[in-house]
C-alpha cells in the first residue's frame, strides 16, 4: 500500500470488460488514466495507450479474464509504486477492482457516456478556465461504444455551453460519419484523405451547402450511416463524371488521387458546414457571444485541423480546448474527468492538463545501449551545436521523457528534420512509407510563431493550421501544403526544455525557429514507446543519429555492425494479450450453450437494453429478434461475418495486425 499522505488515487479505463461480455463489447484504442487528488488539487499522473504496449495499432484485443486485466493494470501502476489495492475508485470498465459507475451530469441523461467522456476531456482540461470563462463544446466522432449504456441513446453526440461552470447540454451533429464513409469507400485513413484534399489542385463545383441542408447527423434513433454513405457516393459519382474527359487534371497525381482529392474537398466543406451549424445552435442555446468563449472540439473529428482553424477564425473564439488524444485514445481521460466532476472531487480543487507528456517514461536507455552495443559507434552527452550539425539537411530520431498522449508526435517520440530541405521531406516520407506529396508538420518555438505564421495562436498539440507568411515560404518548403498552410505545433521552454534548447540552437545558427516533426513509427506500427524500439527503427531505416534521453547516439551502418537488419519493428509486450484463444472460445461457447445464436450476439453489441433486461429479453426472444433484423437488413449478414471474424473462435491473436475498427 502507498502512503496515504501522498493523496488519493483514481483509475479511469477504456478497456473491453473482462468476463462474459468481453466477446460482445468491442472497444478500440484502449487506454488508461491514473489520477491523484491531494489537498486543493487534482493531477493527471499517467495516461497509457495500450497500442504502445502491445504493438497492435488501434489496440482492440480484449483481456478476456479479470486475472489478466489485473496483471496488466498492476504492471502499469507499479511504475508509480501503486497497485489496484491503492485505488479509491475505478471508472469506465465494469468488472475491474473498485469499479464504480460513472456519474452522469444532470441534463445529460439522453447522451451516451462515451460521448460525454469526449466532451469532458476538452472542457475540463483547465479548471480555472472552466470556472471563470465560457466554453462551447462538442464531441464529434463516428459513433459511441455502448458498453456503459442500458438502452440505445436517442442521440449519439454530446454538445454543451458552459457559462462559468454552469453547463447546459444538448445533442449536436457529427461530421465524422462522412469521413468514416470516405475511409471505407476509398480505403485510406482520414488523415491521409484530409492531406490529399489540400495537396492536389483538382476540384469540382458542388453545392455543399445544399447537400448539408438535407442532412441531420444526430445519430441514435436515426443512424447516420445511410445518409453519410449516400452523400459520399453521390459526390464520388459526380466527380467521376466531371473528370471523365481529363483523367489526370493535376499531372503530379494519379487519376485515382485526383478523384479522391476532388471528392474530399467537397466532403471537408460539408463537414465544416456541420460544425458551423453546431456552433450557431449552441451559441443560441447559451445566449453567449463566441468572442467571449473558448471552443472545445473532441472526438476523432477534433483532429481535423482545417475545420478547427476555420471555426476559430470565423467565430473569433478565445482559444481551443482540445486534448492531444481527442480520438478514442483519450476516452479514459474523459471518463476520469466525468468521474471526478460527478463525485465532487474537483469542487474547490485545481486541475490543469497543459502538456501532452503523460505516457511511459523513456526508462530503458542504459539497457538499450548495452543490447545494441554492436551497432553503436559513439555515445555522448547532448550538445546544441552538434544537434544543429546533425539536423542540417538531414533527419534524426528524438526520444525523451514521458511519451505523448494521442496519435501525433509532439516532440518526445519524434523524427525531426531540416524544414529548409525538400530532400528531408522526401526522406521522412520514405522512412514512414508515405506518399511523396505529404508535407511534414513543423514544431515552431512559440515566441517566434508570429514572425513566421499569420495566425498568432498557441497550438501545443498540432490541432490548428496556420498560414506561413508568403515572403518566408521558400525558406521552409518541407512543411508547406499547397495552400501555404502548415499543421504546426508551438513549443514553449516550460513544456519541453531540452527540445526547446535544441530548436533554439538551430534558430541561432540558421535564422529558422522551426524543425520538421513526424511520428517515430513504421507504417502500421504504433508510435515508438521505448529506447530499444527507437534504435530498432533507426537500424531498419538506416538513420545514423538518435537522441535518447538527452544522449547523442551514433550508429554504424549494417555492414559495419556485422549484424542482420531486423525484418520488422521490435516486438512489444505481447505476452499480456497473446494465447487467450481458450479463454475467448470458452466465453463465446457459454453464450451459445445458453441458447443465443451468433446473430443474437451481434444484435446485443448494438442494443444494450437486450442485456440490461434479461428477464424480458430471454435467449429465445433475442434469437427471434436477430432473425427479424437479418430478414430486413441486407447488410446484417456481412456485419455478422465481420463480427465473428473479429470476436469469435477460430481466429489467432496477431500483434500488429490492425483490427477492423468498430463504428
Image (cartoon, rainbow, N blue to C red):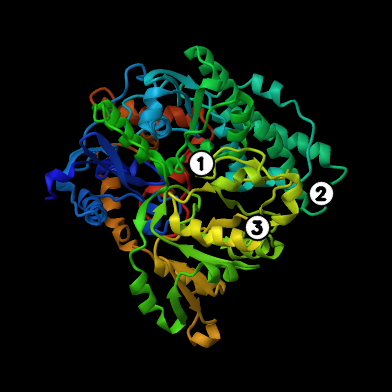
How crowded is the residue under tag 3: few (<14 C-alpha within 10 Å), some, or many (20+)?
Answer: few
Mark 2, mark 1: which one is toward the viewer?
2
Which residue does the image show at 40% across and 70% down from the upper left? 532
Q: Which residue is mark 1?
A: 638
Left or right: 463, with 659 as reference point:
right
Q: Which residue, given by chain and number where applicable, does mark 2 sit on? A: 250
How packed mark 2 is, by other alpha carbons closer than 10 Å (few <14, some 14-19, many 20 or more), is: some
Q: 605 or 126, which is in the foreground? A: 126
The residue at 47%/36% (across/down) is 322
Q: CA distance from mark 2 to mark 1?
A: 37 Å
Residue 287 pos. (x, y %) = 50, 11
Mark number for residue 311?
A: none
Residue tagged 3: 511
Mark 1 against mark 3, which lies toward the viewer? 3
Q: Quadrant of residue 573?
A: bottom left
Where residue 546 sits in the image (x, y, percent)? 49, 70
Which residue reaches farthest front?
Answer: 508
* Mark found first going from the N terminus, 2 or 1: 2
Q: Position of residue 409 (x, y in %)?
A: 50, 53
Q: Is residue 347 above or below residue 443?
A: above
For residue 593, say whether it is visible. Answer: no
Amino acid at each position: 500500500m502507498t502512503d496515504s499522505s501522498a493523496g488519493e488515487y483514481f483509475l479511469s479505463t477504456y478497456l473491453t470488460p473482462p468476463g462474459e461480455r468481453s466477446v460482445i463489447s468491442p472497444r478500440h484504442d484502449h487506454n488508461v488514466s491514473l489520477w491523484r487528488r491531494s489537498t486543493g488539487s487534482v493531477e493527471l499522473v499517467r495516461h497509457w495507450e495500450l497500442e504502445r504496449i502491445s504493438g497492435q495499432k488501434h489496440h482492440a484485443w480484449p483481456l478476456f479474464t479479470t486475472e489478466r486485466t489485473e496483471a496488466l493494470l498492476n504492471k502499469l501502476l507499479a511504475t508509480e509504486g501503486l497497485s489496484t489495492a491503492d485505488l479509491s475508485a475505478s471508472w469506465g470498465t465494469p468488472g475491474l477492482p473498485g469499479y464504480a459507475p460513472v456519474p452522469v451530469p444532470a441534463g445529460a441523461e439522453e447522451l451516451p457516456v462515451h460521448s460525454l467522456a469526449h466532451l469532458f476531456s476538452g472542457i475540463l482540461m483547465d479548471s480555472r478556465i472552466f470556472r471563470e470563462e465560457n466554453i462551447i463544446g462538442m464531441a464529434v466522432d463516428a459513433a459511441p461504444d455502448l458498453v456503459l449504456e442500458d438502452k440505445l441513446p436517442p442521440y449519439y453526440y454530446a454538445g454543451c455551453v458552459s457559462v462559468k461552470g454552469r453547463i447546459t447540454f444538448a445533442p449536436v451533429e457529427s461530421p465524422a460519419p462522412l469521413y468514416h464513409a470516405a475511409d471505407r469507400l476509398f480505403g485510406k485513413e482520414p488523415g491521409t484523405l484530409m492531406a490529399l484534399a489540400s495537396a492536389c489542385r483538382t476540384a469540382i463545383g458542388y453545392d455543399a451547402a445544399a447537400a448539408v441542408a438535407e442532412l441531420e447527423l444526430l445519430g441514435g434513433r436515426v443512424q447516420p450511416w445511410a445518409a453519410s454513405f449516400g452523400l459520399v457516393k453521390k459526390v464520388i459519382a459526380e466527380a467521376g463524371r466531371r473528370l471523365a474527359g481529363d483523367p489526370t487534371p493535376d499531372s503530379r497525381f494519379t487519376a485515382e488521387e485526383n478523384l479522391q482529392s476532388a471528392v474530399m474537398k467537397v466532403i471537408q466543406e460539408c463537414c465544416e458546414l456541420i460544425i458551423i451549424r453546431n456552433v450557431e445552435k449552441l451559441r443560441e442555446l447559451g445566449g453567449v457571444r463566441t468572442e467571449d468563449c473558448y471552443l472545445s472540439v473532441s472526438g476523432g473529428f477534433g483532429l481535423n485541423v482545417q475545420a478547427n482553424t476555420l471555426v476559430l477564425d470565423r467565430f473569433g473564439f478565445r482559444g481551443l480546448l482540445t486534448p492531444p488524444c481527442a480520438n478514442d485514445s483519450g476516452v479514459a481521460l474523459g471518463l476520469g474527468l466525468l468521474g471526478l466532476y460527478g463525485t465532487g472531487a474537483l469542487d474547490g480543487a485545481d486541475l490543469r492538463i497543459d502538456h501532452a507528456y503523460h505516457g511511459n517514461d523513456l526508462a530503458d536507455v542504459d539497457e538499450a545501449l548495452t543490447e545494441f552495443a554492436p551497432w553503436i559507434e559513439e555515445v555522448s552527452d547532448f550538445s546544441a551545436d552538434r544537434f544543429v550539425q546533425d539536423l542540417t539537411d538531414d533527419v534524426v530520431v528524438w526520444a525523451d521523457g514521458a511519451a505523448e498522449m494521442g496519435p501525433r508526435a509532439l516532440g518526445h517520440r519524434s523524427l525531426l528534420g531540416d524544414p529548409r530541405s525538400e530532400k528531408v521531406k522526401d526522406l521522412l516520407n520514405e522512412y514512414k512509407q508515405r506518399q511523396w506529396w505529404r508535407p511534414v508538420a513543423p514544431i515552431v518555438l512559440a515566441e517566434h510563431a508570429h514572425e513566421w505564421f499569420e495566425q498568432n495562436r498557441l497550438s501545443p498539440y498540432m490541432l490548428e493550421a496556420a498560414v506561413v507568411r508568403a515572403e518566408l515560404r521558400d525558406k521552409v518548403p518541407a512543411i508547406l501544403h499547397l495552400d501555404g498552410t502548415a499543421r504546426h505545433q508551438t513549443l514553449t521552454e516550460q513544456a519541453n526544455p531540452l527540445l526547446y534548447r535544441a530548436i533554439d540552437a538551430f534558430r541561432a545558427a540558421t535564422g529558422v525557429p522551426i524543425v520538421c516533426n513526424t511520428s517515430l513509427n513504421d507504417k502500421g506500427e504504433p508510435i515508438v514507446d521505448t529506447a530499444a524500439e527507437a534504435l530498432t527503427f533507426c537500424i531498419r531505416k538506416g538513420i545514423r543519429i538518435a537522441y535518447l534521453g538527452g544522449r547523442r547516439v551514433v550508429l554504424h551502418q549494417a555492414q559495419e555492425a556485422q549484424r542482420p537488419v531486423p525484418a520488422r519493428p521490435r516486438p512489444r509486450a505481447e505476452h499480456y494479450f497473446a494465447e487467450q484463444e481458450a479463454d475467448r472460445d470458452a466465453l463465446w461457447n457459454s453464450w451459445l450453450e445458453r441458447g443465443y445464436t451468433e446473430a443474437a450476439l451481434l444484435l446485443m453489441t448494438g442494443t444494450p437494453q437486450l442485456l440490461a433486461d434479461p428477464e424480458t429479453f430471454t435467449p429465445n426472444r433475442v434469437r427471434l429478434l436477430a432473425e427479424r433484423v437479418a430478414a430486413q437488413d441486407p447488410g446484417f449478414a456481412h456485419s455478422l461475418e465481420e463480427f465473428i471474424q473479429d470476436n469469435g473462435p477460430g481466429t489467432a491473436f496477431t500483434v500488429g495486425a490492425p483490427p477492423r475498427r468498430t463504428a
